[in-house]
Image: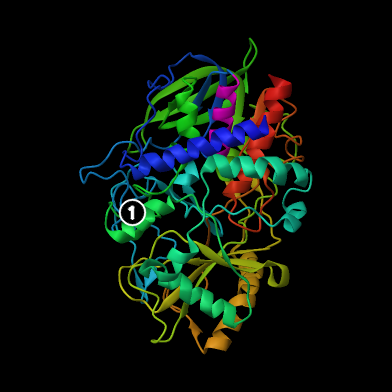
Amino acid sequence: MGHDISRRGFIAGAGSVIGAVAGQHALAGPATAAPTAPIPDGARVPVLIVGSGYGGSVAALRLAQAGVDVHLVEMGMAWDTPGSDGKIFCNTREPDYRSYWLRTRTKAPLNYFLGFPIDRDIPRHTGVLDAEEFAGITVYQGRGVGGGSLVNGGMAVTPRRENFPAILPSVNAGEMYDVYYPRANAGLGVGTIDPAWFEGTDCYQYARVGRKHAQRSGFPFVFVPDVYDWDYMEQEAAGTVTKSALAGEILYGNNHGKKSLQKTYLARAKATGRVAVSPLHRVTTVAPASGGGYRVVIEQLDTTGAVTATKSVTADRVFFAAGSVGTSKLLVKLKATGALPNLNGEIGKGWGDNGNVMCGRANHLWDPTGSLQSAIPCCGIDNWAAGGAFAEVAPLPTGIETFASFYLSITNNPNRAQFTWNAAAGKAELSWQTAWKQPSIDMAKSIFDKINSKEGTIYRTDLFGVYKVWGDHLTYHPLGGAVLNKATDNYGRLTAYPGLYVIDGALIPGNTSVNPFVTITALAERNIEKIIATDL
């Protein structure tokens, strides 16, 4: 079975590549499609999936292939309709109403340049990137059908096998590396840059400078797989297709070359005819229904974030796939408010930031990084074994020469926070403290102090504030809050409530040693296969 699904996944992935290269509209849906009307009040469904990111998309596809009708509700928009400029997503350099989730001012991860603040006022809209602020940390999350796949850099990294026992100690590594990681990589359409093209193209000069500096200091430099269509990018560089990665499109969505979930798992799920999707729908309550199953209360939103309808539907089974933060916030609320009081005491615990920390280095004038930079990173510096850090060589696609090298580091930060329900404020809170980023800074310094010493360079101090070296205020990789084999059983079941499951990044306890979405996808593949075989 596994081989068959992997092969099908590979063929479907290849088909999406060919379609994009042929100039098919990037976000066009398949020919056969499930119902497009939003879920009606009073509906009864066999399966309701809350969220359409990696875990939710895997669950939707595999359940539908098993003959189960699925309704997927997503808080964000569908992102299938171009704006007045003809584009679905806006550019990183010119954020507009499409950029942020219900903010009136942008909150860019890199929010200063040459020491000047670069955030700007925008109209309040259900935009694609959520900068959700908690005490001590801002968590960046994708909002829309496709979740985080809409806004990440697409770095599709499978952790080194020797690191896996520390990531998911209760999971059989042999199964993951023999079956579920390959299945996830096939389903996601993962590929690697052509090394020969990399050596000569202007748009990766910044990465070649990063490689040179890493290697001169003795650090292992690795090419990293990605879900970008590399053939498309080569055509961008040749000027034969509309530019996307080479037009700085990453932070607020990518209009063409990136294989987000809409083009992979979700496209195949919709093509079964068994999956319906309701965008701009936010789940507020899940509780046992008197006649069996679960009563789910859902708010329908408009693009200003206003609630236009409140619906009550019944589902035989509910999969929580709202992302680490969304799932954790909802579950701690449901436990504390008495909707699901028998959820265990591990709910909300084990949350981490994947050790994320950013920094920039000021290079010498004879080491330009290039005014044209592909927004899609393709390589990294692996010092995990010696220093606890893996640093992606990240772009600074400003459109001008910056003489800067920029990095997002993933570090082995041991600190874990907890979500709790604040009844007085009526919201979930997170116990993270900014000071807990210090281990991440120290681990990243194990790379960049050495490179600076060797190259005679210094850290940039103008990217995160005035005289601030480290971007230690954020994470792109939220993980945990409903940890596998603690808050759930070893397959994501919330055992006190048969028919309730967690199937997203909330299951992973805080760190994956690399960019996490391939691990989230592979774990979802593992868990849903078991659930289909035994629970359905």
Q: Was residue 60 drawn as part of the magenta stretch in this picture?
A: yes
User: Which quadrant holds residue 333?
Assistant: top right
Is the C terminus in the top left, top right, bottom left or bottom right quadrant?
A: top right
Q: Quadrant of the N terminus?
A: top right
What residue is shown at x 34% (from left), y 33% (from top)? 302
Find residue 433 and report its horizontal and vertical position in percent: 61, 61
The residue that mark 1 highlights is 244
Q: Hey, which quadrant is residue 306 in on the image?
A: top left
Nearest to the observer: residue 200 or residue 49: 200
| Front one among 436 and 36 | 36
471, above or below 15, in the image: below
Residue at point 33%, 61% (across, down) = 237
Badge 1 amino acid: Ser
Residue drawn where x is 62% and y is 31% of the image: 4
Quadrant position of residue 68: top right
Q: Position of residue 443 (x, y in %)?
A: 65, 71
Residues in magenta? 54-66
Residue 390, given in percent of the width and then of the height, sits at 61, 66
Q: Is 302 above or below relative to 422?
A: above
